């Protein structure tokens, strides 16, 4: 018996003739074993009814052809457009490798490794030597915070710093980074059935609500340290999960810890929490609606990573860079690091799309933990490895970890998209 895919997302068996969806009761006027569709190359194809509303692969030219949904006139062929025909196969093959251009965002990170280290301490000493009045005020304990010291300096910055402490210029950098990477996503990646408006919304959500959620998890996780809760039940399980996350953050940030303990901390603390907060929009979508195709899910993943990375760059700039750091650190933070966050979250997005049924099968909140670990595992490990190598001052190895993150995502995305196209291959001439 053939299957019909309803617009509500329900896939159901239907006999030939009119059929009604058992979920939304929508009437489908025609149920057929095969749906006729014509490719732009002229080949007439017959696609199984289960592919209605999806893309099928033409057996003659290999192009993707949309199969009409049951609510459309299935006898109407897709006519060849009046616009110029699709590019030739060599061009399409070249288009497949365009996403690799995103790896160019690693150039600032690579350059930062192979350029002389910025001696912040020496610049600070020269600044104090040129401003003895500020030193005298410091000896009188007039300054309580680093901000107080920097604001007392001429131009509110130390020698060589790009921006003063009390600037808003880093917000301009954030806007430029968001616009540039958003444009790169639109140019280099297939959006599937996602829209550019959705990408902006997802990026803004993650850069605001997602960041606040992360800060909330961090606060509660730190609060659980030094406490013990015994017994059974949901609250106890949640307490020990948060306590382990808090321990992981402490292990990651403790400078006395070795590589293994630091890696453990960065993976299950920083890596897990950040990748989870970036993936929440996708998990929620596939739990509730599941209308995105694989390319659309990947585009959402890139957008949520960009939103998170840009927001993180704003925080780092205001807390650690303004008034102190030279210009190169801003480029690394708003270009290389934002792109890294994008490829990590996009990798998770592919897993979420492929394992979406596991999230729809979840009934209780505590059942989310294992599926979440499955889809986030690769990204959180790569994230944790990169941060650990930076902490250990293994900068070249950190660059290699970043390159491995890009290589993994680009290979995995290409492989997954081709596998999806192969699954649509049952459309035969």
Image (cartoon, rainbow, N blue to C red):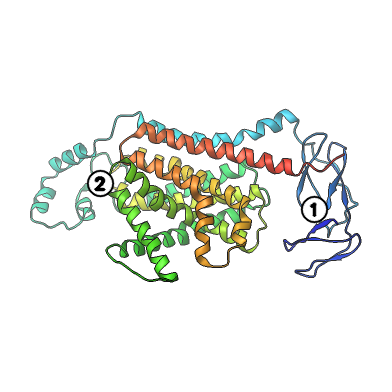
Return the x and y of residue 58 as percentages of the image width and height: 80, 39
Q: Which residue is at a point 62% across and 33% down the rendered structure image?
A: 97
Q: Which quadrant is the C terminus positioned in? A: top right
Q: Which residue is at a point 15% across and 43% down the rendered structure image?
A: 128
Q: Which residue is at a point 65% across and 48% down the rendered structure image?
A: 294
Q: SS for tag 1? A: helix
Residue depth check, mark 2 versus mark 1: number of the one nearer the observer: 1
63 on left or right of 390: right
- Which of the 4 quarters of the picture holds residue 256? top left
Mark 1 or mark 2, which is nearer the start of the sequence? 1
Q: Farthest residue in the front direction?
A: 231
Nearest the eye: 181 or 228: 228
Nearest the eye: 264 or 17: 264
Nearest the eye: 35 or 169: 35
| 158 up-or-down from 273: above or below | above
Return the x and y of residue 31 as percentages of the image width and height: 88, 58
> How many neighbours does mark 1 have within 10 angstroms: few (below 14), some (14-19), or many (20 or more)?
many
Q: Name the residue under label 2.
A: 157
Q: Which residue is at a point 34% across and 39% down the rendered structure image?
A: 390
> How many neighbours does mark 2 have within 10 angstroms: few (below 14), some (14-19), or many (20 or more)?
many
Return the x and y of residue 214 as percentages of the image width and height: 42, 59
Q: SS for tag 2? A: loop
C-beta proximity under 8 Å, tags 2 and 1: no
Q: Can residue 201 be seen in this view?
A: no
Q: Name the residue under label 1.
A: 50
The alpha-carbon separation of the residues under discs 2 and 1 comes to 64 Å
Nearest the eye: 378 or 119: 378
């Amino acid at each position: 018996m053939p299957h019909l895919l309803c617009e509500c997302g329900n896939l159901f068996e239907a006999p030939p003739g009119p059929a009604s969806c058992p979920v939304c009761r929508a009437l489908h006027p025609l149920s057929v074993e095969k749906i006729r569709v014509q490719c732009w190359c002229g080949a007439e194809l017959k696609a199984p009814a289960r592919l209605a509303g999806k893309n099928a692969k033409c057996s003659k030219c290999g192009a993707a052809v949309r199969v009409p949904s049951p609510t459309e006139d299935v006898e109407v062929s897709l006519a060849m457009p009046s616009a110029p025909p699709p590019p030739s196969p060599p061009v399409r093959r070249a288009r497949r490798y365009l996403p690799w251009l995103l790896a160019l965002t690693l150039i600032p990170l690579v350059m930062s490794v192979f350029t002389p280290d910025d001696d912040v301490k020496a610049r600070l000493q020269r600044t104090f030597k040129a401003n003895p009045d500020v030193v005298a005020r410091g000896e009188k304990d007039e300054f309580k915070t680093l901000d107080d010291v920097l604001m007392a300096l001429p131009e509110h910055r130390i020698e060589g710093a790009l921006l003063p402490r009390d600037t808003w210029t880093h917000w301009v950098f954030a806007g430029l980074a968001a616009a540039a990477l958003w444009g790169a996503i639109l140019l280099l990646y297939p959006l599937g059935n996602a829209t550019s408006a959705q990408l902006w919304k997802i990026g803004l959500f993650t850069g605001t609500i997602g960041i606040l959620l992360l800060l909330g998890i961090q606060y509660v996780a730190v609060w659980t340290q030094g406490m013990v809760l015994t017994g059974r039940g949901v609250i106890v399980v949640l307490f020990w999960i948060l306590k382990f996350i808090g321990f992981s953050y402490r292990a990651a940030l403790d400078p006395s810890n070795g590589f293994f303990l630091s890696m453990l901390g960065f993976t299950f603390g920083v890596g897990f929490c950040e990748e989870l907060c970036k993936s929440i929009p996708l998990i929620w979508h596939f739990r509730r609606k599941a209308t995105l195709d694989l390319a659309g899910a990947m585009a959402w993943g890139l957008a949520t990573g960009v939103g998170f990375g840009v927001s993180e760059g704003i925080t780092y700039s205001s807390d650690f860079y303004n008034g102190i750091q030279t210009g190169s650190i801003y480029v690394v933070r708003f270009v290389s690091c934002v792109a890294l966050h994008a490829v990590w979250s996009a990798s998770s997005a592919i897993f979420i799309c492929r394992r979406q049924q596991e999230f729809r099968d979840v009934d209780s909140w505590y059942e989310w933990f294992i599926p979440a670990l499955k889809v986030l595992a690769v990204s959180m490990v790569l994230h944790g490895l990169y941060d650990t190598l930076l902490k250990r001052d293994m900068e070249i190895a950190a660059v290699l970890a970043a390159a491995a993150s890009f290589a993994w995502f680009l290979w995995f995305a290409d492989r997954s998209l081709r596998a999806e196209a192969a699954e649509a291959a049952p459309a035969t001439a």
